[in-house]
Amino acid sequence: MPKHGLTKETVLDAAEELIEAHGVSYLTTGTLAKKLGIKPASLYNHIESTEQLRCELAVRAVRMLSDALTAAIDGRTREDACFALADAYRAFVHRSPALYHLILMIPMTGNDTMTNALPDVIVPVFHALSGFRLTEEERNHWQRILRTVMHGFSTQELWGFFSHTNTDRNETYRLAVQTVINGILHTESEHTKHQGGAQNA
Amino acid sequence: MPKHGLTKETVLDAAEELIEAHGVSYLTTGTLAKKLGIKPASLYNHIESTEQLRCELAVRAVRMLSDALTAAIDGRTREDACFALADAYRAFVHRSPALYHLILMIPMTGNDTMTNALPDVIVPVFHALSGFRLTEEERNHWQRILRTVMHGFSTQELWGFFSHTNTDRNETYRLAVQTVINGILHTESEHTKHQGGAQNA
DNA sequence: ATTATAAACTAACGGTGTTAGTTTGTCAAT
DNA sequence: ATTGACAAACTAACACCGTTAGTTTATAAT
């Protein structure tokens, strides 16, 4: 191909480097073009729009997160799988905060391609819970709660909302995940105690 | 005052209406000026910059959230206080998603005035936990975990990350908060069982 | 009525995303 | 080797963004 060897992958890679180094809002036609050694308008030979570019980055990010989670739980079950999943989730958020930021923005765009990619992240979470004896309804609840904790903790930690005390954050996370697991185990035991009984409190 | 009756409060109110109606990124010198019936440049008689405007909105938002949480736990203790706190938190996020969005952006700005305002939100959380017999370290952990669940659930729900199943979301939230409370109660009981013993799993 | 002042205005700057139209480089066929 | 086609760069232009400087104007106090 003529001129530079620019491909869509090259552009996406450059964009990713840019946002991880300087934040999502630093990604601009100017900064990206400069990094690639071309003029801003020339970008439009490779992308439809900056919004579309962010979309494709977000879809890539979803796949990366999904892959990381899937790899983490490989060969593990129950508590083991849950802790591995939670650690991988938190690690991803801290390793690629900008990409995670893009994932969080997906629902606001209303873009179907992106919204349809989202379940990929949920699959490994369900997988991690598959070792527990839960009804479908119970699994729906606990999958949400596990995601709540992983997302809630990782983002608050990343954004500096846990900096007021210097209590060990690893320990807080471990305790949070353990608490969820205890809840799941409790639900499981309620299940065997009396068929179809009430679950909590 | 001359011309219009514009005060800083009026401007902040208009800005808040704008972002709640059309999203944070819709707040612009153009849209805000138009809403106030003036030209964009005239805004600078009332604000220092758009960033500063967002900052003041964020500080107002922190105070609103803090007040809502404080009011919710008034006269309540322990489980009762925790559920009331959690419900108020979730209600705020859903009633004022744009203001909550601004709060989340505070740490990224590096603005000291704003960062110093943040603990206001944490105070009522500590207050809700004051009824439990916990060491300072334990209270630090559980305060983070409670905030993790309130923030994590509310944002994921708001942003549509819980829409794949139609399992009742109120029930998921209740279960999540109950699970945290159970964890706290467990920590409390470990405390009395043997002085200074290990806490969990 | 005069004056001081706050608050509006217009004009201008650089930056952002984007389109249209133009040049240029490279690759394939003759 | 020349030619031609095409992809990918370019320049020029637009509206909008935040922002500053300089100017006019309306009100409130004297």
Image (cartoon, coloured by chain):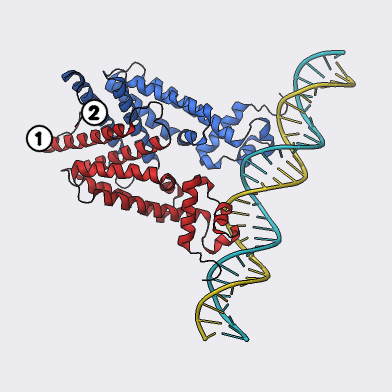
Chain colours: A blue, B red, C cyan, D yellow
Q: Element at badge 2?
A: helix
Q: Chain of mark 1?
A: B
Quarter of the view holding residue A88 = top left
Occupied quadrant, residue A189? top left
Label 1 sits on residue = B193
Q: Nearer the viewer, mark 2 or mark 1?
A: 2
Which percent across, then down, holds residue C5? 54, 75
The residue nearer to you, when weighing A117 against B193, is A117
Residue, x 27% and y 48% (percent of image)?
B72
Q: Residues within 10 Å of mark 2 (few under 14, many from 20)?
A: many
- Is residue B123 visible from the viewing direction of this image? no
At which x and y percent is residue B130?
A: 20, 47
Q: Secondary structure at mark 1?
A: helix
Residue B61: x and y in percent read 39, 52
For the residue marked with disc 2, what is the amino acid? Answer: Gly
Residue type at mark 1 is Lys
Position of B58 with respect to A35 (left or right) is: left
**Residue B75 versus residue A174: which sits nearer the camera?**
B75
Task: Tell me if B27 is positioned left or right of A48 in this view.
Answer: left
Tags 2 and 1 on a common chain: no
Query: Which residue in the protein does label 2 denote?
Result: A183
